[in-house]
Amino acid sequence: MARGCAVLGAGGGSDPHLGLLQALQATEDFGPVPLVDLDDLPDDALIMPCGGIGAPTVHIEKIENGDEGARLRQHLEYVTDRQVAALMAAEIGGSNGLQPISFAARMGLPVVDADGMGRAFPEVPQVTMHLAGISPSPAVMTDERGNLIVFRTISGHWMERLERAAAVEFGGVASSTEFSLTAAQAREATVRNSVSLAVQIGEAVAHARGSPVDALIAEVSAFRLVTGKVSDVERRTTSGFVRGSVVVEGLGEDAGRLVRLELQNENLVALERGRVLASVPDLISVLDSETADAIVTERIRYGQRVTVIAFGCAPVWRTEQGIALTGPRAFGYEFDYVPVEERAGARA
Amino acid sequence: MLAPDCRLGIDVGGTNTDAVIMDTADRVIAKAKVPCTPDIIGGITVAIDTVLRSPGVEPQRISHVMLGTTHATNAVLEREKLRRVAVIRLGGPATHSIRPLFQWPPELADAVSVGATIVEGGIEFDGRDLSPLDTDAIARFLGRVGDGAQGVAITSVFAPVSPRHELLAAEIVKRELGEVHVTLSHEIGSIGLLERENAAILNGALAGVARDVADAMQGALAAHRLHPATFFAQNDGTLMGLDHALRYPVLTIGSGPANSVRGAAFLTETSDSLVVDVGGTSTDVGVLVNGFPRESSRGVEIGGVRTNFRMPDLVTIALGGGTEISRGPDGVRIGPRSVGYLIQKEALVFGGATPTLTDSAVAAGRVALGEPRRADPHRRLLAEALARADVMLAEAIDRMKTSKDDRALIAVGGGSILVPDQIPGISEVIRPEHFDAANAVGAAIASVSGQVDRIFHVGPGGRQAMLDEACDDARERAVAAGADPRTVQIVELEEIPLAYLTSPAIRVRAKAAGALGGLPEQHLQAHLARQARLARPTEPAAPS
């Protein structure tokens, strides 16, 4: 599952290794966590989406206590006057995809086989619940010390702004829940089976008979954009996000090709000679050519041997509203979204 | 009698132990290659004896000895001679969701730990206290486990931002337990709590090993009535003094390949190129950047434990001078077995019965050794094997290249006779004099480094002020480690912005290096002259 979360992170999210260790320790200490399908929950069951917010570089030092999840639940129950029935990953990509397992094990709650993105995105409101018109409020944020804030905001944008500012004061990372919803709402408003997908990706890679990269591409029906080595990395921070670009120079069959990835925490766009190969909201992942391990944007280094793949996002992101929230124009690009399979078809 | 003015460099490899003696002008005046022994120290002793008895060597002239050794790695892998360590993490109430030593191989954890605790304390990324340090909890923990502890490993959250809680905790350890070996994580690793903590624990466990090897080597030298200043090579190919090595033995892990890359740079007077080091059993391909081995961006696993101290970025393949060749059902088979140091007996050209890659190189006319006609009956097998080995080598080299442009390749190590003159993507193969002792030369060239890996907040001075501060700190650390201030230069500078935060912060890694201080003035002059010859813009060209 950790491998799968890394691939679905599309370059963003914290290193899933930490989430994996947390999940392993919690299930060792408190027992296994059941994975439930939304169809198996009563319509009015309250689901608490949760995850970490803040800087991955801080997270690799300041790891959670483990009790944050219980505190989020307690206060969400207090302000909503309802019982939480299950936890859900707000985003499946990166460490956040595994975070709910560590929390759920301590509380004896199940985790639902769904998430709010089907990948990783940088901003709080970039979730499918937002598209479905579910309110991010009341949101609860806490740290390892027991400090706690309840947020009620007039929009997703304000939630993003206030939560990120608070995360800095908490010490660069915090745990939070937003967009709490019922199982009935979640059936329409989430990306379903994404936990299973992460597990399947991990299994495909682990049991690959030949190349792990080929096995992964087959598992998610991805398109191979280029295989080569990282020949240039440029990164800069602007208003809280790492922006930059990575150039991958083709090797072997791809010799002579140069593919440029533009990134803002996640990989946003892949370009070749000014032509777009793939863009958000479709997923672009950079894999180690040998092991198929996904490499997060902060870890990309000159000289690494990589394969860049792209695959289709959850269908909800391809609606008019979805594209407006997470398409190329939402990230400041001047072109329209075209699904990766159409772009790949046009190239072949 | 001349004043002591020579350095003795020793490097323990997988197959052989090499020793060289270098003078103030950095000339190699003697070298020796002897087989490794299972206890390592036997090989070191024989190498010292052999090189000191070489013609033209006056042992009394040895003023410094520099050792690169595999003791630490072997001790972890074999779980032998490890000390038992009390593990203290300063970071509560954070970090409890992953406890110290979690997911370590159980036998290693049992061999190393007398107990672990997480106490309140630690630092935030912006330098504030995460929580006030709970000194009483540390004292209570030590009271519980202290009797069994031969060392203490202390790791604070964000120690690379400020070591103040680690330093306070060290004082409490001293108060409670007296003079026990203490490892502070900020001295070893960079950002990444668990990996840095793992490295600190391993370091505590290895303290006895470092003491043993230092004592044994000094004993071997004392037999020649020598008492030179003693240094250990660390994983970037630079040196640390004996005191530092005794406190931080884990830093010796990875010194072998680093020594080879540094030696190759020194022998060819280049600062940027590819280096292939072919030994008896394996081949390492590394990259020389600004005179130092390029460091791996991935964490390094040692004995099944993830650590994050910086190791040379290498591709290693099972290909060496002693690699055995046989015919299997699918054609020729190369290795992975090697006759190792028995090459002088086992190889065909030396009258043995085992076809090796050395025989292939002789049969192909790449080198004249032994009696070439003894290899004749196996001519076809040897030729097929060499063709296959050439492909393996070319692939390994290509994986380390950073651009498609042709690059020069420096071939070193006793087995580098295997390396062909023509390799795809390689403009020329450089074979320096003393190529077979480049690793020991790398240990003996005597440079010292200092590193910084910290998170900075963009202040009024802007980005440049932070970079300057990081560089100044790295320079200071190099000088503190023993570098001559006149020679210290920044050899590496990297900045990584922090994602998902609203306040601008960057992580800066800087490394400075210079020549070891306290050597004769002629040596300093030789170092400065070489530095001047190499001084030229080394920025890689950006792809258009």
Image (spheres, coloured by chain):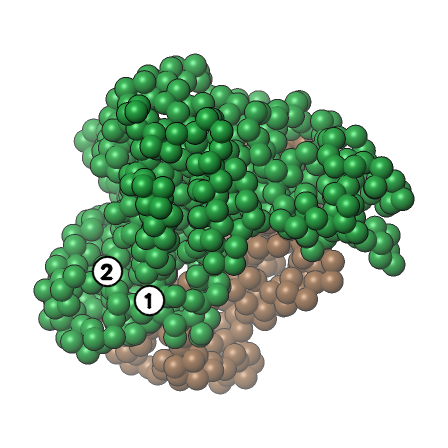
Structural crowding at the residue carrying mark 2, measured as other residues with C-alpha within 10 Å and reported as few (<14), some (14–19) or many (≥20): many
Q: From the viewer's perspective, tell me whether residue B511 is left or right of residue B140.
A: right
| Residue at the disc numbered 2 | B181
Residue shown at 34%/50% (left/top)?
B219
Q: Which shade of the palette goes to chain A? A: brown
Q: Chain of mark 1?
A: B
Q: Which chain is green?
A: B
Q: Residues within 10 Å of mark 1 (few under 14, many from 20)?
A: many
Look at the numbered disc 1 and give the secondary structure of its residue. Answer: loop
Is B324 situated above or below B116? above
Position of residue B288 measured from the top left corner of the image (x, y, whole percent)? 50, 31
Picture quadrant of residue A275: top right
| Contact, mark 2 vs mark 1 (Cβ under 8 Å) | yes
Q: Earlier in the sequence, mark 2 or mark 1?
A: 1
Q: Give residue A134's quadrant in the image.
A: bottom left
Q: Is residue A120 above or below residue A257?
A: below
Q: Which mark is residue B354?
A: none
Chain of the residue that carries numbered disc 2 in the rendered image: B
* Quadrant of the image containing the C terminus of chain B: top right
- Measured from the top left, where is residue A61 in percent x and y? 32, 56
Front-lying residue, A79 or A154: A79
Q: Residue at point 74% right, 43% down?
A: B350
In the image shown, does B277 or B452 lie closer to the viewer? B277
Dot 2 falls on a residue whose secondary structure is strand
Q: Could you say where residue B207 lies in the image, as x and y percent from the top left? A: 31, 58
Q: Which part of the image, by quadrant, shows the N terminus of chain B?
A: top left
Q: Is residue B466 visible?
A: no
Circle count: 2
Separation of disc 2 and disc 1 at Cα? 10 Å
Residue B83's disc number: 1
Name which residue type carries label 2.
His
